[in-house]
Image (cartoon, helix red, strand yellow):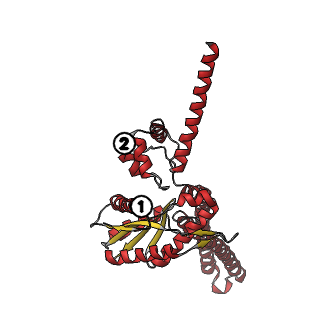
Amino acid sequence: MAGASAKRVANTGEASAELFCRIGEFLRDNHLSPDPLHYAFAYRVLTDTHGPLARAVAHLTDGGVRLSRRDIENLGGEIGTLAPPIPTEAMVLARNEGLVAQTQMQVEGFTDIVQAMRAETEGFGRDLAASADAIRHRHHALGPETLGVDEVVRITTRMLDRVRSAETRLEAATHEATELRARLEEARDNARRDPLTNLPNRRAFEEAYAAQVATGASVCVAVCDIDHFKRVNDRFGHTIGDRVLKAIGEALCLGCEGHLVARYGGEEFAILFADVPPDAAMAALENARETVAAKRYRLRESDELLGAVTFSAGLTAAIDDEQFGTVFARADALLYAAKHAGRNLSRFG
């Protein structure tokens, strides 16, 4: 009896360890953060592999498509509040923390210099006024012919020394302010740029949308997602995957020249069309999609054929001053409709 009981305990432990590993793989494959709510959703899927939830997930992820936030919510899951920010943006912000501290110190130093120069100027004014009074007194007491040349030279020399000192300090402060301005501009640009593709990031895209809507411009938003991108990473590695991301970003910029192309996150790109009719925006998007689909990529290290790389897209027009989240969700839904219809497609709605 004791031996059988120990065997059951061992089998239970092995099953738990296996389930834990499978949940980890599920979260990783779908780019989900390992917070309790996502873990609970994965647990429900993997502990009832023949149930309706598991079947729905299998249908949605057929062919390597990852689950979206909307998919999880529609299936009755919850989106955790513990999800970390986009890694690339988080890294940029962390890198800029030191710059912010440094620039704050430079601003304080610049203020100190200006205050010291002001005090110096005030002191010089007082000294000059006192010297002028002394000269006037001597002039009235002894007559104009007795005005001391040495006194005039002394006052003039002191004035020149202080002016030169002030000019030196002002030049140094101006140089420091110029460097500070350049650093702050660089920091602002980095915070709104994706370091891999060098395209604007999610923050820059959403700010650009808000700016265009504020001017009353007509706006269309496209969301693009690389088809079967997980297969590329799994077969060739993330380094090749990064090259594919950059290549698609460049192709979108060429095909949609004059419009804002951003890497929105992961393998998703977004395009902002301003003051362009929807049919013209769709034509540009289709041109970019067909150009990408016609290319055949090779690995430069081995000349191995990577094959065709395609993307699917959803395009929608904003209605009046419609909020960005509503417009993006509509475009995202059209994107996934294109995915489920066979991929390498664009949908407008």
Q: Are marks 1 and 2 in contact (CB under 8 Å)?
A: no
Nearer to the camera, 271 or 275: 271
| Mark 1 neighbour density, 10 Å: few (under 14) some (14–19) many (20 or more) | many
Q: Nearer the viewer, residue 140 or 227?
A: 227
Which is more toward the observer, 242 or 318?
Answer: 242
The percent position of residue 154, horizontal first and vertical second, equals: 71, 77
Q: What is the x, y in percent for residue 103?
A: 60, 61
Label 1 secondary element: helix
Q: Amino acid at mark 2?
A: Gly
Q: Which residue is mark 1?
A: 339
Q: Is residue 126 visible?
A: no
In this picture, residue 100 sits left or right of residue 265: right
Image quarter of the C terminus: bottom left
Residue marked by disc 2: 76
Image quarter where the N terminus lies is top right
User: What amino acid is labelled 1 in the image?
Assistant: Lys
Residue at 40% over, 42% down: 53
